[in-house]
Image (cartoon, rainbow, N blue to C red):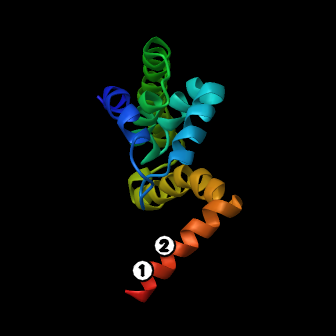
Amino acid sequence: MGYAFGVRVGKKLFSREDSLLFHKKNVLKAQEFYRKHGAKTIVIARFMPVVRTFAPIVAGIGTMQYSTFIKYNLVGGLLWAIGLNISGFFLGRLIPDVDRYIVPIVLLIVIASIAPSVWHLLKDPDHRAEIGKLLRRFIKK
């Protein structure tokens, strides 16, 4: 559904003016990124909250071929589903009474899965400037 939505909406986005949430330059960057790294992005996105939701949409907007998208989406889904279950099984065997530590483990997983996105945003000066502008707007209100 996300891919189909991206294909349908993608062309309409280019006719819109830039706004708070949409910038044409970002769509162009996304298209170029998907040309270079699209397949591995679809697989890796499965393991990153939030990114997992938007990756198919951006793939559709970025005009990634559907056959490529579906192939790597299936690979990512299988790795995620099987990998998560196998990891849980071995973690349960490795750590006695793992249920006592479930909250710290879940927090560690969430932090580890969000960290690459945060790092990417913070290392880019343009992104840092945009984040600063948004924070100043919210602080003023």
Q: Residue at x 62, y 33 (%)?
A: 32
- Across and down, in percent, residue 115 comes to 59, 55
Q: Position of residue 116 (x, y in %)?
A: 61, 51
Q: Quadrant of the N terminus?
A: top left
| Residue on which disc 2 sits | 134
Residue 42 horizontal side relative to residue 16, left or right: right
Note whether residue 97 is visible: no
For residue 102, say whether it is visible: yes
State the residue at coordinates (41%, 60%).
103
Tag 1 secondary structure:
helix
Outermost residue to the top: 67
Neighbor class of circle 2 (other Cα within 10 Å; few <14, some 14-19, many 20+) is: few
Amino acid type, mark 1: Phe
- The residue positioned 47% from the left and 61% from the top of the image is 104
**Image position of 58 with respect to 63: above or below:** below
Q: Is residue 132 above or below residue 105?
A: below
Q: Does residue 44 sit above or below 100 in this rendering?
A: above
Question: Which residue is tagged 1?
Answer: 138
Disc 2 is placed on an element classified as helix
Depth check: 30 or 25 in front?
25
Number of residues whose C-alpha sits closer than 10 Å to that of mark 1, classed few (under 14), some (14–19) or many (20 or more): few
The front one of 93 and 103 is 103
> Disc 2 vs disc 1: Cβ atoms closer than 8 Å?
yes
**Numbered badge on residue 104:** none
Q: Residue at x 57, y 23 (%)?
A: 39
Q: CA distance from mark 2 to mark 1?
A: 6 Å
- In the image, is 7 to the left or to the right of 131? left
Place of residue 108 in the rendered image (x, y in percent of width and height, measured from the top left): 52, 57
Quarter placement of the C terminus = bottom left
What amino acid type is highlighted by mark number 2? Leu
Q: Whole-percent x and y of residue 11?
A: 39, 32
